[in-house]
Image: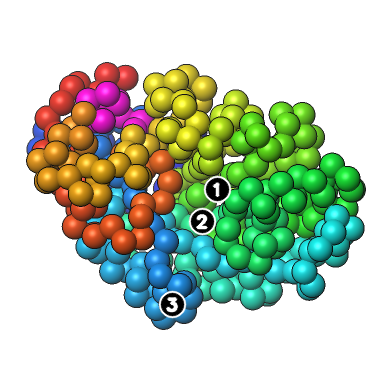
Amino acid sequence: MTLPRLGRSCFFNRRLWKGQVMNRRERITAVFKGEKPDRTPMGFWMHFPTEQHHGEEALAAHLKYFEETKTDICKVMNENLYPVQHPIMEAADWADVKACGRNHPFIRSQVELVKRIVDSTADDTPVIATVHGIVASASHALMQCSRYDKVGRYAQLYHLRTNPDSVYSAYQAIAESLTILAEECIAAGADGIYYAALGGERDGFTAEEHARYIAPLEEQLMREIDHAPIGNILHMCKPLVDLERYVDYPCEAVNWGILESGVKLFEGRKLFPGKVIMGGMDDGSQILISGSPEELEREVHNILAENDYPGFILASDCTLPGNLPYERIRMMEKACETYRGGSYEL
């Protein structure tokens, strides 16, 4: 396992005697070092309402969420769409997609939000910046909205198959922009990058297409940015996602849609040896959404019992429902505290 590069101010030490209470950074650092934390950490996030996507409203929404949920990983959401000069109507239009420089609003708006959140949170708070992957960003450019559905996905796929040079040139430009975005977020104080990789679904790009047009660009991108204190968190989701397409992506932690992929946590742990595993909670679970406190605590305890090892972070398959009361997330944090399970065998 790659050891984390400790950021801002790290309070971690090796005095993990029984009963010691860690702060967020100590807890996360312990997990990424393969050592026993005081309790299993958790990382949950959600999309905020449209009016809270940017500026002061976005800052306030993030800080309120972090404070009220007590999540150990503070992930900064990214609601910026990849810019295009004119709508993409046909395959040849992809050739007009350009890379964004460091001063482009697409870069600066997100970096400014990350910096303000870093400056507004305590040194013991790990802040992770979200970067949407190449295929997701291309979909945003095509649809000019944050949707990633079959319409945009299949249109992108059709364009690639009919004019691969044009689409691939856009992928290269997007990869360059995402590298700059991630680097600027790290320079602004982000402890790591949450890279949301899409395009690995079996009913979309073939394995050969993914290996030729997508994986090399994303692997290079992730190698170049893999120097933050925590490093890269690789997120893989959408129905029928083929996790094996991502096994060589440079990262320190992985998170995927368990229900959508059909790959259970213990199976993913074998696919990604030495990586921190994030997951366990179905974001659409009725127990999560409306179960009693006792039912939710029992569900969390069951997940922790099945994943009772140091390199595990309780998380969901993807973003939580936007209308989920924060107290439900806080209940999971308390359940992590009350768990009295196994021995954290290494």
Identify the amino acid type marked 3.
Glu
294 displayed left or right of 309: left
Above or below residue 227? Residue 209 is above
- Residue 50 coordinates in the image, percent (x, y): 45, 72
Q: Secondary structure at mark 2?
A: strand
Identify the amino acid type marked 1.
Ala
Q: Secondary structure at mark 3?
A: helix
- Quarter where residue 283 is shown: top left
- Quarter where residue 62 is shown: bottom left
Q: Earlier in the sequence, mark 1 or mark 2?
A: 2
Judged by depth in the image, the label closer to the viewer, 1 or 3, is 3
- Residue 164 coordinates in the image, percent (x, y): 87, 45
Q: Earlier in the sequence, mark 2 or mark 3?
A: 3
Task: Using a 10 Å C-alpha cutoff, classify the residue at mark 1 as few (fewer than 14 neighbours), some (14 to 19) or many (20 or more).
Answer: many
Whether residues under marks 1 and 3 lie with C-beta atoms below 8 angstroms apart, the answer is no
- Quarter where residue 99 is shown: bottom right
- Residue 256 coordinates in the image, percent (x, y): 47, 37
Q: Earlier in the sequence, mark 1 or mark 3?
A: 3
Q: Which residues are magenta?
A: 303-312
Whether residues under marks 1 and 2 lie with C-beta atoms below 8 angstroms apart, the answer is yes
Residue identifier under label 2: 130
Measured Cα–Cα span from mark 1 to mark 3? 23 Å
Residue identifier under label 3: 51
Task: Using a 10 Å C-alpha cutoff, classify the residue at mark 2 as few (fewer than 14 neighbours), some (14 to 19) or many (20 or more).
Answer: many
Image disc number at residue 196: 1
Residue lying at the far front in this picture: please name it: 151
Identify the amino acid type marked 2.
Thr
Above or below residue 89? Residue 335 is above
